[in-house]
Amino acid sequence: MSNKFLKKKFFHTKYRLINKEDHTIMKKKEILEIKKQFTPENCCITRIATCYVSREKEIVLSKVQAFLSLAEEEAFKYFDMFRKSLSGKKGKNLYDIQFKTEENNLSENFMDTLRKTKLKDLEVLEEFYDKVINSYNTCENYLITIIHGVYDIPGKTADGVEMFDASDSVYEHILCCICPVILSKPGLSVNLKKTAVEDRVRDWVVDHPSDGFLYPSFNDRSEDIHELLYYTKKKIIEQTGLIMELTGREENILSNDEEKEIIRDILIETTTMDLSAMRDLTLNMDEIIEESEEEELMISGKQLGKMLEKQGVSEEECENFLAAYQTKLGNKGVHLSSLFDRRKMDIKTQEASVKVEMDRVFDIETRTVDGRVYLMIPLNNNVVEVNGVPVKGYDKKIDG
C-alpha cells in the first residue's frame, strides 16, 4: 500500500478555512500582470515624482514630471525599480494590508485622494512626503519615488485568453518605492584621457527598493481601494510606523517566519505530542493545502485546536493551546503553509538531525530495543551517504 494512499485514507478531513482576514488577496498572477506593464511596450505610467531625503529627515530635492519625458535609459532603470518592488514571496516580502475598518478613515481617504490627484497637486504630494519622512524607520539617505498609472484592463475569454480590444474597465493606481541612497565604494579607476590609473570619484547611488507599496490592490483584476500591497526587503515589523501612517492599522503585521515561530513556541509550551501525532498533524495540513485552490490559506486558533484534538492531544492541552494562542495572536489567523516545510520533515534529537521527504514520513518510526528508544529509518536500496560520499548500508537485523 503506497504512502500516498495511506495519507488519503487516514488524513482526509474537510475544513472550512478562514480567508486571509476575511478579504480577497492579490494573487501571484495579478501581481505578474501589473509587473508586465513596466516595459516600454506596455507602459501605462502617466507621471513620476521623486523626493530625496537626507538621514536627518530633510528634503534635499524633489521633482515631478511626465514619465514619457524621461530619457530612455533612465526610464529602463525605473522600470527595473518598479518590478523589484512587486517581487518576492508573500508573507516574506509582499503583504496584503487592509486599511483600518472604520468609517471616514483618514488614512484610506488620503491615499485615495493622492491617487486621484494624478500627482498634479503639489500640496497633497508634499503632505504624502511628510507622512513618509515622519514615520519611515531608517538611518540612511533615501529616495522616495512615486508614480501614477492608468492600466486599461483587457477582457479575458473563458479559457483565460486576453482580449486587448475588449477592455471595459481601467485600473488607476499609484506605486511608491523607497530606495536607500548609498555612497559608492572606494577604489581605483582607469582614466583613458589621462592614460592613468587614479583614485575613483565616489558618488551617491540609488540602491534597489527596501520598501514600497501599490495602491489600491489589484484583486480579482480590479481595484480594491480598501487594501494596499506592501513590499519590504527586510522585516516588515521594522516599518510598523509607516504602515500605520499609510493604512491606519495599529497592530503589527507578522511575517510567515514569525507566525511559524509563535505557533512552534505555543506547541512547545502547551502540548506533548509523540512522533506519530506530529507527523499526522503535518500531513493533515499538507493535504488541506494540496486540495485547496487558494494561494494563501489561513487557519484560526480554534481550527488548529480541532486538528490537535483529532491527533489525540488531550482536552486540557488543547484548551491550554487555545488560551496561549489567544494571548499571543488574538483572533488573527495564520498562514497554513508557513507552519511547516511542505517538502521535508525536520526531525531532531540531541545527537542528530534528519530531514525526511514528505512522501516517506510513514517509514519513520520509534522502537524500543534493549530498553533504549531508537529512531528507525529504513534504507532505500541499502544506500547511505556520509558527507556526500556513498557508503554501504548494513543488513544486520535488530531484535525488538
Image (cartoon, rainbow, N blue to C red):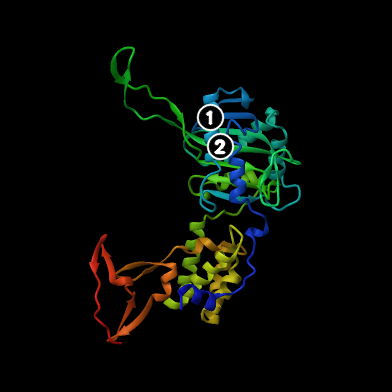
Percent of width and height locating residue 147:
62, 33
The residue singled out by tag 1 in the image is 76
* Whether residue 340 is visible: yes
Q: Is residue 93 left or right of residue 164?
A: left
Percent of width and height locating residue 352:
30, 68
**377 or 244: which is nearer to us?**
377
Q: CA distance from mark 1 to mark 2?
A: 10 Å
Type of amino acid under label 2: Phe
Residue 178 in which image quadrant: top right
Percent of width and height locating residue 393:
25, 72
The residue singled out by tag 2 in the image is 82
Disc with the residue nearer the chain's start (1 vs 2): 1
Task: Tell me which residue sits at (52%, 55%) in the image.
Answer: 255
Task: Tell me which residue sits at (41%, 71%) in the image.
Answer: 360
**151 or 380: which is nearer to us?**
380
Residue 386 in which image quadrant: bottom left
Residue 395 in which image quadrant: bottom left
- Please rate how many residues cluster around mark 1, counting C-alpha atoms within 10 Å: few if below 14, some from 14 to 19, many from 20: some
Type of amino acid under label 1: Phe
What secondary structure is marked by label 1?
Answer: helix
Task: Tell me the mark number nearer the camera, choosing from 1 and 2.
Answer: 1
Q: In the picture shown, does residue 37 fall above or below 335?
A: above
